[in-house]
Image (spheres, rainbow, N blue to C red):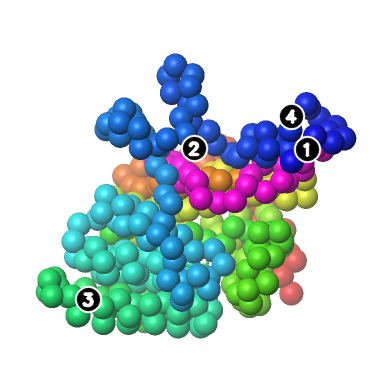
Amino acid sequence: MEKRNNKLNDLSGTEWIKFTKSWAVYDSEGNKVVNYNREDTRKIGFRSWFIHNPPSRESNKILHPASFPETMINEFILFFTKRGDWVLDPFLGSGSVLLSAFETGRNAIGIELSEYWANISKKRLEEARIQKKMDIYSGEAETKQIVIVGDSRNIDKIWAENKFPLVDFVITSPPYWNQLKRAWLRQKKRKEKGLPTEYSEDDKDLGNIDDYERFILEEKLIFDKVYEVTKDKGYLVIITNNIFTNKRLYPLAFDTLLTLSEKWCPKDEKLWLQDDKALLPLGIYNEWVGNRHHQYCLIFRKEEGKKGELRKEFEKRIRSLYLKLLSECNESKP
Ligand SMILES: C[S@@+](CC[C@H](N)C(=O)[O-])C[C@H]1O[C@@H](n2cnc3c(N)ncnc32)[C@H](O)[C@@H]1O
């Protein structure tokens, strides 16, 4: 791309676009690492980031506008659970977590608001089960993967009605606020192919809440309930991101970490780096707009022993703000 009327710097178009990628790797000598399979970066301890360039998606999965790679979910499940344990995804989408649980020999429950996506999950599971029966080497212990069509706000009732056990591990990716409705540039290609660009038009869909603070609050209230159906010492991993919209960054991932910390003990974040996403000429020659090619995997743990300490800490920092929002939301309810 040629240089023209560049208001900010002297870079060429290609240089500009490359720099807006949200991550870059440098070794300790300051060299930019572009070949991630270098011998020295393959040694344990040297390569501490993880990059997922997932295999191309099967046709049913590609339908979902925001699915995550099973290869990545497999790694989390293998780390945080043992064979036969129970896994939960309260925002199931096209069913990646149930598929991973099936592949890794774990039981799992997925809750999905939209019947359409729930059916896609069921179909994908059926296909995987048929495929496995056809494999000569199959014969692993039977596990259950259960799809529930419902609102995660009612997780307490869903557990009571179905007499589900407490789960060992939760891994999920809630809607990224109302980002799908806004990400018109990335979604344009999907629209052209006739693929869905939103989860649903349901008012109960978290992705349809336009008010940012309200979204953060409703998300927190759901994970407060998820806490109650998780075993003590069980982990929760939330895959989410900060959101650039209206020419500024909304700290969705950071606010998720803060608000959940009243109950859940925050442990860490792991970065999912995406290296196979096209770089777009966002803000080119004009102003900084990043190409966000990473997502946050926030790691929490249920630690009943730390309950009081966590609440105290939370109250000190954000409870007063949260209570103000809660009363405002209640006032605005019809
Ligand atoms: C980011 S997507 C999850 C994608 C999933 N990880 C996958 O790989 O396909 C979020 C999902 O949450 C669902 N959802 C939104 N609000 C919900 C609610 N209140 N209860 C249950 N599911 C909800 C949406 O329909 C959407 O499919």
Q: CA distance from mark 1 to mark 4?
A: 10 Å
Q: Mark 4 highlights which residue? A: 11
The answer for how far apart the CA atoms under marks 2 and 4 are is 46 Å
| Along the line of sight, the residue nearer the viewer: 211 or 147 | 147
Circle number at residue 2 = 1
Q: Position of residue 56 (x, y in %)?
A: 43, 63
Residue at 27% in and 69% down: 102
**Where is mark 2, residue-wise?**
313
User: Image height check: is 81 above or below 163?
Assistant: above
**Amino acid type at image mark 1:** Glu
Q: Residues within 10 Å of mark 1 (few under 14, many from 20)?
A: few
> Which residue lies at the image location 57% right of the left edge and 67% below the top edge?
65
In the image, taking residue 138 as reference, residue 289 lies left or right, namely right
Please say whether residue 219 is one of the residues in the magenta stretch.
no
- Marks 1 and 4 in Cβ contact (< 8 Å): no
Label 4 sits on a secondary structure element that is: loop
Of discs 2 and 3, which sits in the foreground?
3
Image quadrant in which you'd find residue 188: bottom right
Query: Which residue reaches farthest right?
Result: 5
Q: Which residue is mark 3?
A: 132
> Does the residue at mark 2 contact the one at mark 4 (Cβ under 8 Å)?
no
Task: Out of 14 and 200, give the one closest to the viewer.
Answer: 14
Q: Is residue 103 left or right of residue 149?
A: left
Mark 2–mark 3 Cα distance, whole angstroms, equals 48 Å
Tag 3 or tag 2, which sits nearer the N-term? 3
Q: Quadrant of residue 266?
A: top left
